[in-house]
Image (spheres, helix red, strand yellow):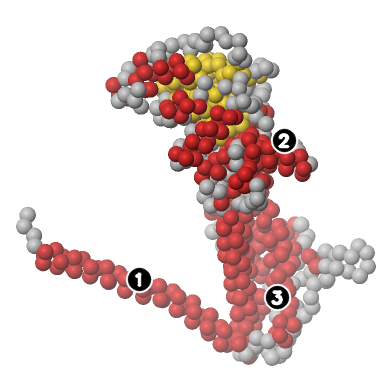
Amino acid sequence: MVTTLARPQPQAAAAPEPDAALTLKAEAKALNFFYGSFRALNNINMPIYDKKVTALIGPSGCGKSTYLRCFNRMHDLYPGNRYEGEIRLYPDNTNLLSAQVDAIEVRMRLSMVFQKPNPFPKSIFENVAYGIRVRGERKQNRISDKVEEALRGAALWDEVKDRLNDLAFNLSGGQQQRLCIARALAADPEIVLFDEPTSALDPIATASIEELISQLKQRVTILIVTHNMQQAARVSDFTAYMYLGEMIEYGRTGDIFIKPKNPQTEAYITGRFG
Amino acid sequence: MERNVEEIRALIARHKVNDHIFAIVGLVCMMIAVIMLLAAFLDLFIDGWSRLSWKFFTSFPSRRAVDAGILSSWVGTALVMLVTMLSAVPLGVAAAIYLEEYGKKNWITDLIEINVTNLAGVPSIIYGLLALGLFVYMLGLGQSILSAGLTLALLILPIVIVSTREALRAVPSSIREAAYALGATRWQMISDHLLPYSRGGILTGVIIGMSRAIGETAPIITIGALTFIAFLPPMPVTASPPFVSFDWLLAPFTVLPIQMFNWVSRPDTAFLANAAAAGVVLIAMTLMMNGLAIYLRYQIRKKIKW
């Protein structure tokens, strides 16, 4: 029960043991976010490692989607939103939230996959090609090659290669979500942001998306919001537990799920809360 | 509380009486509206039927009712509508895009929004007076097809703006976010996504506006359209270079409603049949435009599901 819990006492999100194989890809530093006067994120500090899957878990309204949407500045689209602090993107050490950095530049580098599949009402091909066209590619054969590569990357090529000109709406829900993943991949992102990508899908489609995410981390850094703890346990390398806009605990997924340090994390993970 | 089945059934029967009464009242109200319209159209059709022939469409007005036709007025109507569409669509769509996508939401845009909606209710003769001063005299466009087209464009601009805004708003925010998330600029999002997906709604608004404009008489009379025109505007294509001519824009003209008005006000009752026939043509043109709107909207909506 939410009401029986005291306000969380956030612990400094201590980075896990230094590991030679880990490279830092991005880092949130003292990040605060405000919807008008409401403080939705409170002093978030968190590393994101290159070519690893980092999962954000927590009960509804804890700010995990809000946090994810800071990374590609989606909050810029609506009035009254304000960021404080930094999200550093490495190796060039750019602050994604800086007013001097154009939100479009940020979105050119980070792709996003949304909660509900949201293909454009265009053909399968045009859906994937859009990000490539926005990046200035004009040569038709280059575009075709990249579309095929992205569809293969999203494990959708074999199902759609004979009907690339069909409307994307004719695909099933799971196929539409993989199409959205292909659309995100075609943009050559450095990080792919997944916002509860399987919450609108059935278990079989969910399994195929999860398998896809596990494959994708060979090539790209992944940050995923999920309401499903088993999903976080299955696909992620690192997990962060959030509650009421604060980062309660961050660590290796194995550690978080087997021996959480914070009693609140333990309560959430064991299903006694949330 | 004791209550037997008989009592419940009696209660339901009493309640259902109101049901039946309203069904009958509603049916009568609906029939009044439909029958009046049908009767008016049928009457027009019967009166004008004898005059509807090929010759009616290819003859200029004449002093003798049997020789008089609507050539100059239907050509005039078609050309005025063309000017109206070409000026109202870009203006209205651009204004709607600005208000919906670029304009910051503050009291100024609220004020503009209320005024745009109210403009749709301004009596059309007011637009006529405005146009007489602005287009005819100040800009010196004269009593021309161009003046009339621009006047009617002003008249239907609020309709186009309001319906375009509604069409843009119907595109879900998830689609906008998808485009933005791929790095699209606002204009790329608008031109690659919003406009193509809201075509159906925009088109419907344009055609509803055009259906209103085609029957407008008061503003056209105000700017001084002639009632008796026995010639056509100059051709837009010429035999000598530069082969295109825009002289037709500045030509005097008449339109169908004015031609009808002229015929109805003649003492010779033989002209009444002409007026009825012209009315049938006008209604047929309006129905055709509405039919086209419904068809196009259906075709476009078929591809889009949300």
Q: Is residue B250 above or below residue B267?
A: above
- Using the image as rendered, state which of residue A1 and residue B278 is in the foreground: A1
The answer to whether the residues at label 3 and label 1 have Cβ atoms under 8 Å apart is no
Q: Secondary structure at mark 3?
A: helix
- Using the image as rendered, state which of residue A141 and residue A112 is in the foreground: A141
Q: Secondary structure at mark 1?
A: helix
Q: CA distance from mark 3 to mark 1?
A: 40 Å
Q: For the point 62% across and 47% down, which residue is it?
A: A160
Q: For mark 1, name the chain.
A: B
Residue A146, located in which quarter of the rendered image?
top right
Disc 2 packing (10 Å; few <14; some 14–19; many ≥20):
some
| Label at residue B128 | none
Quadrant holding the N terminus of chain B: bottom left
Q: CA distance from mark 2 to mark 1?
A: 59 Å
Q: Where's residue A62, x and y in %? A: 42, 25
| Label at residue B26 | 1
Q: Is residue A202 above or below residue B230?
A: above
Mark 3 lies on residue: B74
> Residue pushed farthest right?
B240
Q: For the point 71% across and 67% down, which residue is it?
A: B80
Give the amino acid at mark 2.
Arg
Mark 2 lies on residue: A135
Q: Is residue B147 above or below residue A44?
A: below
Give the amino acid at mark 3.
Trp
Image label count: 3
